[in-house]
C-alpha cells in the first residue's frame, strides 16, 4: 500500500443514501481509487438495515455506513434528519478516523481525506482538531469540496479555510467562493480530474462525467475483484 483515500459524504451507493449527483460522484471516485490500488474508505449515511461495514474490491474498498442507529430513526432517506446527522458525523467520526489512519501514517503513507458538501464542514473542523491533538495534523491531506452553493450560509468558512484545502467541482463554484473571498482550487467531479487535482501541481482539467445510474441492488458501480 502506498496511497490511502477516505471519502466522507452524506450520500453513497445504497438506495437509502442515493439522492443525486453527489452519490454518482463519490461512488465513481471510490471505485476509481480502489481500481488504482489505493486503500479506500467511504464513510456515508447508509442504509440502516445493511451491514455497518462492507469490504469490496478485494479489500481495497471499505464502505462504512455511519450512525445507522440514527438513520433508523429517519426512514425517509439520507437527508431526513439532516441536521442531526451532520452533528453526529462531527461528534463521532473524527476519533474513529484518527485511530483508523494512525497505522497508515506510521507506515509512511500520507492519507487523503475528501469531505463533500456543507454537511461535512463541521466534521472537517472537528477532525482537524483531533489530528492536531494526536500530533498528526501535518500527516493528512484534508480536502473539503463543494459541488453546489446549497447550505453555504451554515459553513464556518474561517475555520474551514485554516484546516483544509477548499475546492469546487466547477469553475463557477470556484468563482462563487472567490466572490466570498474564499480561496478555492478546482477539483472536478469526474474521478480522473479529481485525482489529477490531488497532484502537487493540480491539473485543472474538467472532463464530462459519465452518467451513473443506481441498479436495483444494495451497492453499485464498485469493482469486486
Image (cartoon, rainbow, N blue to C red):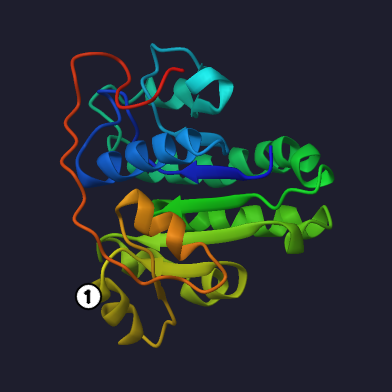
Residue 38 % position (x, y): 57, 39
| Quadrant for the N terminus in the image | top right
- Packing grade of label 1 (10 A; few <14, some 14-19, many >=20) is few
69 vs 38: above or below:
above
Q: Which residue is mark 1?
A: 172
168 vs 158: above or below:
above
Residue located at (50% from left, 52% from top): 114
- 210, 129: nearer the viewer: 210
- 196, 81: nearer the viewer: 196
- Which of the 4 image quarters holds residue 13? top left
Q: Is residue 157 left or right of residue 153?
A: right
Residue located at (54% from left, 34% from top): 41
Say whether residue 130 is visible. Answer: yes
Residue located at (43% from left, 18% from top): 224
Residue located at (84% from left, 58% from top): 135
- 193, 70: nearer the viewer: 193
Say whether residue 117 is visible. Answer: no
197 vs 216: above or below:
below
- Which of the 4 image quarters holds residue 194? bottom left
Residue 21 % position (x, y): 21, 46
Q: Could you tell me how many numbered marks the image carries?
A: 1
- Which of the 4 image quarters holds residue 81? top left
- 176, 71: nearer the viewer: 176
Q: Is residue 114 left or right of residue 213?
A: right
Q: Is residue 82 left or right of residue 142?
A: left
130 vs 71: above or below:
below
Residue 136 % position (x, y): 79, 56
Residue 50 % position (x, y): 41, 12
Q: Secondary structure at mark 1?
A: helix
Amino acid at each position: 500500500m502506498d496511497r490511502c483515500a477516505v471519502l466522507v459524504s452524506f450520500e453513497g451507493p445504497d438506495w437509502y443514501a442515493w439522492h443525486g449527483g453527489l452519490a454518482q460522484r463519490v461512488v465513481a471516485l471510490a471505485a476509481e481509487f480502489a481500481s488504482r490500488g489505493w486503500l479506500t474508505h467511504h464513510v456515508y449515511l447508509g442504509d440502516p438495515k445493511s451491514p455497518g461495514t462492507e469490504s469490496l474490491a478485494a479489500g481495497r474498498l471499505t464502505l462504512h455506513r455511519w450512525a445507522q442507529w440514527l438513520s433508523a430513526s429517519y426512514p425517509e432517506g439520507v437527508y431526513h434528519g439532516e441536521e442531526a446527522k451532520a452533528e453526529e458525523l462531527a461528534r463521532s467520526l473524527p476519533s474513529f478516523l484518527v485511530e483508523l489512519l494512525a497505522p497508515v501514517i506510521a507506515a509512511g503513507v500520507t492519507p487523503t481525506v475528501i469531505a463533500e458538501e456543507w454537511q461535512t464542514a463541521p466534521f472537517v473542523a472537528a477532525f482537524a482538531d483531533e489530528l492536531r491533538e494526536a500530533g498528526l495534523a501535518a500527516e493528512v491531506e484534508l480536502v473539503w469540496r463543494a459541488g453546489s452553493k446549497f447550505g453555504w450560509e451554515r459553513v464556518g468558512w474561517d475555520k474551514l479555510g485554516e484546516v483544509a484545502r477548499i475546492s469546487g467541482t466547477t469553475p463557477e463554484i470556484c468563482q462563487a467562493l472567490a466572490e466570498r473571498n474564499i480561496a478555492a482550487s478546482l477539483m472536478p467531479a469526474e474521478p480522473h480530474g479529481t485525482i489529477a487535482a490531488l497532484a502537487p501541481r493540480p491539473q485543472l482539467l474538467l472532463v464530462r462525467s459519465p452518467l451513473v445510474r443506481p441498479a436495483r441492488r444494495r451497492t453499485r458501480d464498485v469493482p469486486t475483484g
